[in-house]
Image (cartoon, helix red, strand yellow):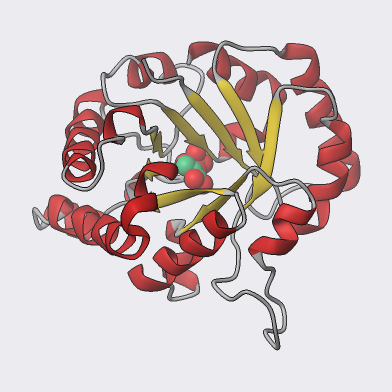
Amino acid sequence: MRKKLVVGNWKMHGSRASNAVLLAGLKEAGPWNAQVAVCVPFPYITETALALTGQLVAFGAQDCSAHEQGAYTGEVSSAMLADIGCRYVITGHSERRAYHHESDQLVADKAKAALAHGITPIVCVGETLAEREAGRTEEVVKRQLAAVIHTLTHCIGEIVVAYEPVWAIGTGLTATPEQAQHVHALLRQQLKAATQKADQMQILYGGSVKPDNAAQLFAQPDIDGGLIGGAALKAADFAAICRAA
Ligand code: PEP
């Protein structure tokens, strides 16, 4: 039986003051049956860690470098994230793939770097609207996941996968539970060919998950929780989604 996981992706939102309010709200609302985590902007990770001391809510980052260390101005290594206690790091979010031109291979290399430091990468895959409309959803997500499987080889069972159709992120459009389940089942099938751990792996759905659609999505057999953007910025909404998981 897989445990559900709900991860809040704060993206580039927040301030010390607003984060304190959000985290206090989460502390009051928990605990939940699901595993819960927040992936916050780099400057706020340490303060988030302090605020979550003694709580069951884990924390992490939204990106990491594929490099170990060195002259990479502006980058943050997995070793640094591990040093400050991060449990998770998101890799390959569609916003990074689109705005920072991250390739499938770079995403896979980042996931590898995270695992090398004991951090669980949450690897995002997902098709654009044009790709879905062209009937290319399966080809695209399989290609994205294949790069990670190829790069991580025997460690692939240690990652979390997030299926995030790009057309559903921040748009208010959500994949139907059936559409999402269809892709999740494909991804699990692909993982099964690579690892015996596939049935234990968490595959999250992301894309306009809200309190009123979370339960239906999470009820699907291969949807093991969610990666939540906009709704993770309000404690009441995020808590309701965690309750639904
Ligand atoms: C995300 O950023 O990963 C996401 C799914 O955003 P939203 O929930 O706002 O669609």
Q: Residue furthest bottom?
A: 71
Specify whether 108 is left or right of 149: right
Q: Write the residue at 64% across / 42% down.
A: 87
Looking at the image, can residue 103 be seen? Answer: no
Q: Quadrant of residue 142?
A: bottom left
Residue 118, image x and y in percent? 60, 50
Q: Front-most of 215 and 92?
A: 92
Looking at the image, can residue 33 be seen? Answer: yes
Q: Front-most of 235 and 152?
A: 152
Image quadrant holding the N terminus, namely top left
Residue 144, image x and y in percent? 28, 60
Q: Write the residue at 32% across / 47% down.
A: 165
Specify whether 56 is left or right of 17: left
Count of numbered badges drawn on the protein: 0
Q: Residue furthest left?
A: 135
Q: Write the residue at 16% across / 45% down.
A: 193
Residue 77, image x and y in percent? 67, 68
100 lies above or below 159: below
196 lies above or below 102: above
Q: Write the residue at 28% across / 55% down.
A: 145
Specify whether 220 is left or right of 218: left
Residue 19, image x and y in percent? 82, 39
Q: Quadrant of residue 183?
A: top left
221 lies above or below 151: above
Specify whether 80 is left or right of 227: right
